[in-house]
Image: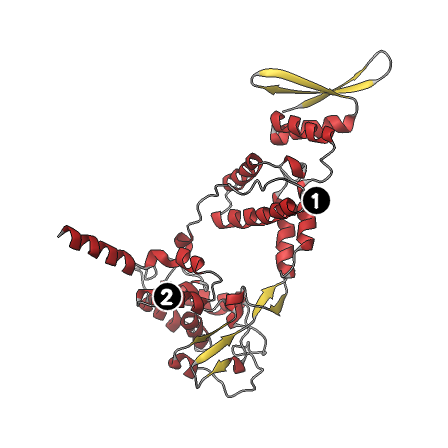
Amino acid sequence: MASIDARTTSDGTTTYRVRWRQDGKSRALTFIDAPSAESFRRNVEKFGPTEAMRIIDLVDSGISQMTLEQWCTAHIETLTGVEEGTRRRYRAYVRNDLNKIGTMPLSAITDTTISRWVNDMDESGASGKTIANKHGFMAGALNHAVRAGKIAKNPCDHTRLPRTDAADDTVMLTRAEFDLIHDAMTPRWRPFTRWLVATGMRFGEATALVVSDVDARSGTVRISKAWKHTGNGERKLGHTKSRKGHRTINVPASVIDSLDLNRPGGELLFPTQSGGPISHQLFRNRAWLPALAKVCAEDAEPRLLKRPRPHDLRHTCASWMINNGVPMAVVQQHLGHESIQTTIATYTHIDRSSGEAAAEVIGKMLG
């Protein structure tokens, strides 16, 4: 903790001494005005005395006109090609996650500052994916600062992030497990559920489809749009998540045959009873959770090793393809991943064919 003592000299001048302890010793620094003393005291408590002293040097050099929070806020407004919902999420990052470092001068941010920020989020219980998302935003903002000549290098470049074990949170259903959930649903929700597992489409993509997007003769569906959250509780129709998300994929004939395609082409393929788009919350509350509850209640023995989410139907689709020999590049195209590295990172742990082939080669060499 740091404290401030005000002293009035014999000539009537008031000075402000900031006191703190460092390396077991009492230290002090005197300021001629209260705001400067208070700013230094806050920096000592937030960042430690070493960083606080470095910030003073920057201030004295006249290069601390903009704080990290001010830069990040300005950066958000210059972004192009992003949805307004994404901007709102980034603004929330600045508002809620920079409380310890946001007031620091932009030029005072170092790799140590970023590492401490990441560690603070980790210690607060944030997931690896959440930390990676927030660090990714910060890295983009500071890359912009480098390009603008505000800082010499990006202090996010070499941050070691906490592990993000996506596989630990992912549930890939067997065919028997899928059938349990599917059959526990009312007939109203079964075609949509089969569609999600057959296509591996993102929920926002599937609920944005219209009748004319399906070509029954070729057995394909054209995916070109998705519902986007605006960040204020509303949704709007927008582009798919990435350029590769705009795609045409094949769908099993049995799945297409279960659809009602004898309707105007502009109608939603999977509408609510009122004709609007199905929301994730509606599907989860009316179809998914009741089916899981029914499956778990029918048998004392747990027949689902993990409780899946609707999004796990997408992972299930991928696992069924990979386990049956479909190449990763085809899985990438089917799911609409921008990069095959995303596909590999998410699903390589279930593709044992390459590992088995490698072990067979070594086995032959060893006789």
Q: Quadrant of residue 53?
A: top right
Q: Position of residue 117 (x, y in %)?
A: 56, 39
Residue 62 drawn at (x, y percent): 74, 32
- Find the distance from the CA under tag 1 to the CA under tag 2: 52 Å
Q: Which residue is mark 2?
A: 295
| Disc 2 residue type (three-letter) | Val
Query: Which residue is most to the top?
Result: 10
Viewer-side label of 1, 2: 1
Q: Quadrant of the N terminus?
A: top right
Q: Nearer the viewer, residue 72 or 226?
A: 72
Looking at the picture, which amino acid does disc 1 mark? Gln
* Residue 360 position in % (x across, y down): 20, 56
Element on which disc 2 rests: helix
Q: Look at mark 1 in the image and give the residue it sits on.
A: 70
Residue 144 showing in the rendered view: yes
- Residue under the image location 21 percent in, 56 percent down: 361
Q: Dot 2 surroundings within 10 Å: few (below 14), some, or many (20 or more)?
A: many
Apparent side of residue 306 relative to residue 121 in the rendered image (left or right): left
Residue 13 locus on image (x, y percent):
84, 17
